[in-house]
Amino acid sequence: MRYSTACSACRTRRRKCEVPVPGAQCVYCATQNISCSRAGSVIHPRIKHPHPHPYQRSHPHPNSNPTSPVSPAPPIASHATANLAHLAHLIDPATVASSVPSVSSAQSPPSAPSAPKPQVISPAAVVQDKALCFELVELYFKYIHDQLHSLFHRPSFMLDLHEGTAPLILVYGMIALSARFSSNPVFAGIPRMARGEQFATEANVLLNLRDVSLATIQACVLLGAISIVEGEAAAESVFYAAACRIANFLDLPNMPTPDPLQREIHIRVYWSLCMIDVWSSTGVNLPRLMNRRHDVPLPMNESTFLNMSRASSNPFDFILSPNREDSLLAQNIKLNGILLRVNDAIKALTSDSTVTNIDETVSALSQELKAWEIALPPTIRDTPSNLHAFASQGQGRIFIAVHVSHYHFSQLLFYQYLDEQRRYPDSPTAQAFARKCKDNAVALSRIIDLANTTPGCDCFFNMLGHIIVITSSVFIHTLLFETDEAEIAAARAQLERNFNSLVTLRQYWPALEVCFARLKTFHELCRKSTDDTYRMDRWMLRFLTEFARPIDERERDEEANVDRWSIGNIGISPENWA
């Protein structure tokens, strides 16, 4: 596969990327007031640098800030005028930089020191440099593994790496994702977003789909992850589809293995594919490829898994492993099964005008999410003490990822009622479910803020950008329609912190430009009219679930004449609400 020279925004919209001046923004990004990955990093559209230094492009002057994806809004004739005007101001980058402390430098991956000239990185030389190679693979396990996917047993992989037996395609794939987090001087002068390109190219060259094996599955998942962070949704879908097809062909969970450790790795890879399939298929609006099998056990506790070794050949070590309910990955798998049904419910709502039982479906799914939370072992529940305990074991980031998933899936489930709450103020169902949406958005933002200030818990996985955009749209609803001054003030403050988190993520992931473009589009719709912005239609479905591509205001206009679902028979009593 040849990597495109177009910027991430033009790749995702499948249009020609025109750059009038070498090293500058492309025409589309300049007109949309978003940063252009073709230019190397975030660039202020009103300052022209025809030939910026590569290192300067990735490390702007401390007093300069990324341009906000949201342009100031003119006054509109409604009671929300003041809050909407403030919204345009608060997500201006200058406002964010002056009023919100950035993510602690002690928590963020340190910046690489500046260098007078950009260097050319040879992937082969990096792998041959044992210390550097180990550093980059460790960064992969620190910031990527168990947050985007769970494919490896870290101790045995590091042993293979030390002995020179780790498959090169896997090493290249890991480094393609992790190099952006490195502070090693070898990367000085190379924009963080561009550091993985050559490693990804090498991994693509080494991919052999005729090798139907676990290593090929793992390589395809790594290449799929690389594709999606570059904004290449089509390539991501193909790589993930290949991984799922091979796993199903091999019957991966039941495939003979030489030891219990390898059996557990197969189980974790299988469940990772099941989880990836849910959000990846939804993101490109394609059918799912994996069937969840009840005969496959959930993964074991993370600490137990990490303490296993290939030397343990007793099959009873696997069968008699401790209770699998205390595994963070197992809990995330359970949540992902609920997300599958949440996505189906939202899709049915926007594609089938005859749906009449949506309230009952939402109530049932709400009870499932509540039951999941109640059934959590005490040591896994969302408490500060549990977070610090997992952080001390090096598992703080996966703990955060599990609870971020819980709150995000919950806000997705109830999101449709933000519109119904305003249209049907006398509906107890709409009022209660809209409040649940906002409560989950608050909880989600709280745990992200906590992660950013807790050592060993800072999260930088790319999907967090999409989640923060959805959460921010909930807080925008509060600015526009709530009347409680304390709640409005809290929403303003949280929007500032959310925008600051997006700016932090933006330096690592090209696909964050899509997130900023979505935020800008959403604000433009609010600026034009607050009446229909939260209407649950096919455009809103794409906004909530199809994270891999930009969305356009014109697409919303095309939905205007489509019959929308409206609340009908409200027959759920409050005591049945979860």
Image (cartoon, rainbow, N blue to C red):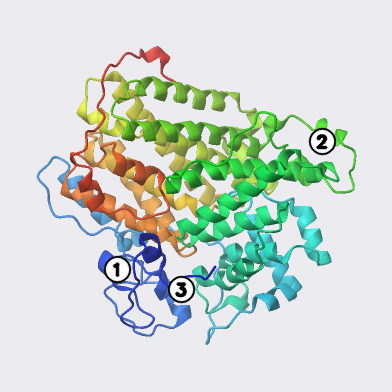
| Front position among marks 3 and 2 | 2
Amino acid on which disc 1 is placed: Tyr
Image quarter where the C terminus lies is top left
Seen in the image, is 335 located left or right of residue 312?
left
Q: Which mark is residue 58?
A: 3
Q: How far apart are the two marked residues, 2 and 1, measured between alpha carbons?
A: 55 Å
**Few, some or many C-alpha atoms within 10 Å of disc 2 (few <14, some 14-19, many ≥20)?**
some
Image marks 3 and 1: residues in contact by CB distance under 8 Å:
no
Q: Which mark is residue 318?
A: 2
Horizontal and vertical percent for residue 438? Answer: 36, 34
Q: Would you say residue 101 is visible in this rendering?
A: yes
Residue located 66% across and 54% down the image: 218
**Few, some or many C-alpha atoms within 10 Å of disc 3 (few <14, some 14-19, many ≥20)?**
many
Q: In the rendered image of this protein, does residue 557 appear above or below residue 535?
A: below
- The residue singled out by tag 1 in the image is 28
Q: In the rendered image of this protein, does residue 196 appear above or below residue 319?
A: below
Amino acid on which disc 3 is placed: Ser
